[in-house]
Amino acid sequence: MKQTREGMDASAAAVTVPNRRPRIRTEKVWAMVTLIPSIILLGVFVYYFIFWTGYVSFTKWHSFIQNMHLNGFQNYVDIFKSFRFQSDLRNMVYFTAFFMIGTLVLGLFLALLVDQHIKAEGFFRSVFLYPMAISAAATGVIWSWLLNPNTGLNLILHAFGLHNVPKWYLSTRILPHLHIASINGGIPLAMFAVLIASIWQWSGFAMALYLAGLRAIPEEIKESARIDGARSIRMFWSILLPQLRPITTTAVVMLMASSLKVFDLLYAMTGPGANFVTDLPALNMFDTTFKGNQFAQGAAIATVLLVLVLIFIVPYLIGTLRKEDSK
């Protein structure tokens, strides 16, 4: 009787197995068919236009009249020689460094506070994340009002008896006096106004990442550290911070890519600033291409920006793929 049942089960399995394979194949085919339109759109509107921009950067297209004659690397030589682009590179280095440090530190601090299981945690999470929901252009307008030297925060400073108030984004001072090529390589003070607005907008994003990372750390690890006598500071440096390293890596890559592409906030808040003290490559590219009609030079600036982003993104993607393959 037992042999009969086993024989029946084997017969049923033999009947059902051939039916699953065609079903799996059909699902894979439908998945590939569904992906094809997205691949075509990405190929046309992303990768083709990247190739087209790179090609234009090597041409003599310097007016409304299209001129696709090749010009070699002359456009790249011209932009790197220009005072404005050199200022952009200086500003980009300082902006990226301070923006990442400020956003990560503030985001981690907020995440640690929210992770204390305080009352109305959802309310505070929403408050800190809300700046991300505001467009960068609106953020720029709001902070340009707040940091106006004659209004906003300076009125509060005046109320506390401070009369030597900062000029914020109208300041033209660059400290220290350090000549690099044809520019002063010091830190433009006006750039800190843009940094305040940018950090305010992105710190909620960093907080969300770190909070997810903190909640993913097993309680057993924290409890073992407490039993071993680890206090708050020791717990943070030896347990929490190493566990948050993948989160920090992801946040650094995303914030760096965002800082290199920042445009709308800067355009709405300060523009290039006096003597280009708040100018960045993306704004320079927009002005060169659509106001100056220097399409080839604008394409050269865009290509340089793309290369800078790839320098940071590609190693991260390679590392991520290697980790997935090793699992």
Image (cartoon, rainbow, N blue to C red):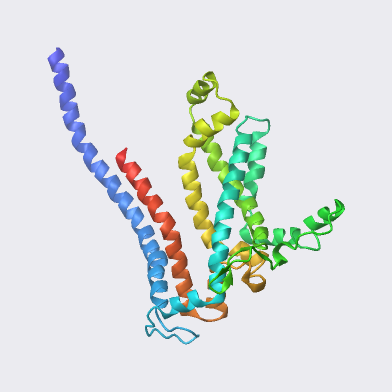
Measured along the vertical axis of the image, is residue 155 above or below residue 185? above
172 or 72, nearer to the observer:
172
Q: Quadrant of the N terminus?
A: top left
Residue 230 vs residue 45: left or right?
Answer: right
Measured along the vertical axis of the image, is residue 180 above or below residue 26? below
Residue 69 vs residue 211: left or right?
Answer: left
252 or 325, nearer to the observer:
252
Residue 225 in view, yes or no: yes
Residue 170 vs residue 32: left or right?
Answer: right
Instruction: Give coordinates of residue 10: x percent, y percent.
Output: 16, 25
For the image, the number of numbered tags is 0
Could you say which quadrant of the image residue 107 lies in? top right
Measured along the vertical axis of the image, is residue 130 above or below residue 69? above
Residue at the farthest top position: 1
Instruction: Give coordinates of residue 136: x percent, y percent.
Output: 62, 59
Residue 101 vs residue 7: left or right?
Answer: right
Q: Residue at x 49, y 32 (%)?
A: 216
Instruction: Give coordinates of residue 259: x percent, y percent.
Output: 54, 58
Q: Residue at x 38, y 58 (%)?
A: 38
Q: Quadrant of the C terminus?
A: top left
132 or 243, nearer to the observer:
243
Instruction: Give coordinates of residue 271: x percent, y percent.
Output: 64, 69
Q: Residue at x 42, y 86 (%)?
A: 67
Residue 286 in view, yes or no: no
